Image (cartoon, grey):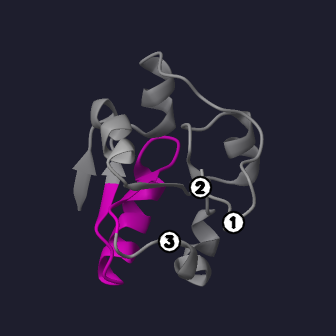
Amino acid sequence: MREIAIEDVEGAVAAGATLVDVREPREYVAGHLPGALLVPMAQVTGRLAEIDRERPVLVVCATGNRSGVICNVLSAAGYDALNVVGGTSAWVRSGRPVETGLAPAPGVSR
């Protein structure tokens, strides 16, 4: 499984990578990385069409465990998936900004 350090996430997103948060909605609403698309772990396989196969996909959860599993699923499906090391917890500890609440509905660009 490929990984990306939290220090490199903002640059990768600015360069066009898709950021996918695989936590549960209540976790996401409490605080998520800016621009992250919420696709709970249990819904990923049913929502693959929402994730651009032509762009790298950065996958994040709370600590990196769930996102690691999903990276393997996405990689097997042909995506260029990278696990965000340390997850949202490491992001918050680093002092980087978080968003709260729900993001726009699927299909609304960020």
Label 3–label 2 contact, CB within 8 A: yes
Stretch in magenta: 55-82
Label 2–label 1 contact, CB within 8 A: yes
On-image quarter of the N terminus: bottom left
At horizontal 38% and vertical 36% (from top left) the residue drawn is 10
**Type of the residue with mark 2:** Leu
Query: Is 75 a magenta residue?
Result: yes
Where does label 2 land, which residue? 37
Using a 10 Å C-alpha cutoff, classify the residue at mark 3 as few (fewer than 14 neighbours), some (14 to 19) or many (20 or more).
some
Q: Earlier in the sequence, mark 2 or mark 1?
A: 2
**Type of the residue with mark 3:** Ile
Query: Is 17 a magenta residue?
Result: no
Q: Compared to 48, does 66 lie above or below? A: above
Where does label 1 land, which residue? 106
Position of residue 13 measured from the top left corner of the image (x, y, whole percent): 39, 46
Give the left or right position of residue 81, taking residue 42 as reference.
Answer: left
At mark 3, the secondary structure is loop
- Give the number of the disc on residue 51: 3
Q: Earlier in the sequence, mark 1 or mark 3?
A: 3
Q: In this view of the protein, which residue sits in the foreground, 6 or 56?
A: 56
Q: How many marks?
A: 3
Position of residue 37 measured from the top left corner of the image (x, y, whole percent): 59, 55
Q: Compared to 46, does 43 lie above or below? A: above
At mark 2, the secondary structure is strand
Position of residue 70 measured from the top left corner of the image (x, y, whole percent): 43, 66
**Type of the residue with mark 1:** Pro
The residues tagged by marks 3 and 2 sit, at their Cα atoms, a distance apart of: 9 Å
